[in-house]
Amino acid sequence: MEDPPRKFYRLAPGREVRLRYAYFITCNEVIKDDDGNVTELLCAYDPETRGGDAPDGRRPKATLHWVCASNGISATVNLYDRLFDRENPFEVEGDGDWKDNICSKSLTVIENAVVEPSLASARPLQRYQFERKGYFCVDRASTSDRPVFNRTISLRDTWAKLKKRANQQKNNKKK
């Protein structure tokens, strides 16, 4: 996040984090495309912190789980979410019907996700936990050349809850 709020302990400009099984890195610059989308982060690493500890005792507040893009393999990841926008999909407004309550974001497909190289040997219906993301099952259509993973259960994201609360407070102040 470029301009993180208080208690956001992930990577941001000027912030230091630990890369799990690697080094401490600090984000120095954010590169954007013409549309303003972040495309690259320029970071510096501290070679003295290999393995996750600093000789001077620094302790970053966040550890990032990551996959090396040059060693990882490309996969399709299907992120399933709630099928309906409402708890009771049969509660409809006006002349609508239950199909109007289908959530447009119930499936997000990530075509070129990078996963650990060991997952090339994953077989259909095998299950895995992707750290901090949730539990996934290998799709029946998966191949060693193009693995496909379906999220079956997501993990709770405490940051999303904090962000939602901050947005609600912001909206209340505008009223």
Image (spheres, rainbow, N blue to C red):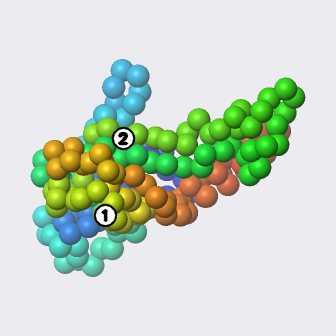
User: Is 45 positioned to the left or the right of 18 in the image?
Assistant: left
Q: Quadrant of residue 63?
A: bottom left
> Which image quarter: residue 129?
bottom left
Q: Residues within 10 Å of mark 1 (few under 14, many from 20)?
A: few
Q: Nearer the viewer, residue 76 or 140?
A: 140
Tell which of 173 and 125 is nearer to you. Answer: 125
Percent across and percent down for residue 4 are 49, 50
Estimate the x, y position of residue 166 in percent, counting from the top left.
65, 52
Q: Residue furthest top?
A: 34
Amino acid residing under circle 1? Gln
**Residue 156, relative to residue 51: is it above or below?**
above
Instruction: Name the secondary structure under disc 1.
Output: loop
Spatial separation of the CA atoms under disc 2 and disc 1: 19 Å
Does residue 55 lie above or below 104 as drawn? below
Residue at the image point whose x is 29% and y is 57% from the top: 124
Q: Earlier in the sequence, mark 2 or mark 1?
A: 2
Tally the numbered discs: 2
Q: Is residue 146 left or right of residue 61?
A: left
User: Residue drawn at (59%, 35%), measured in percent from left and top?
Assistant: 104
Q: Which residue bears the numbered disc 1?
A: 126
Which amino acid, mark 2?
Ile
Left or right of 47? Residue 20 is right
**Residue wearing tag 2:** 110
Q: Residues within 10 Å of mark 2 (few under 14, many from 20)?
A: some
Q: Position of residue 1 (x, y in %)?
A: 44, 46
Residue name at image x 27 percent, y 78 percent? 57
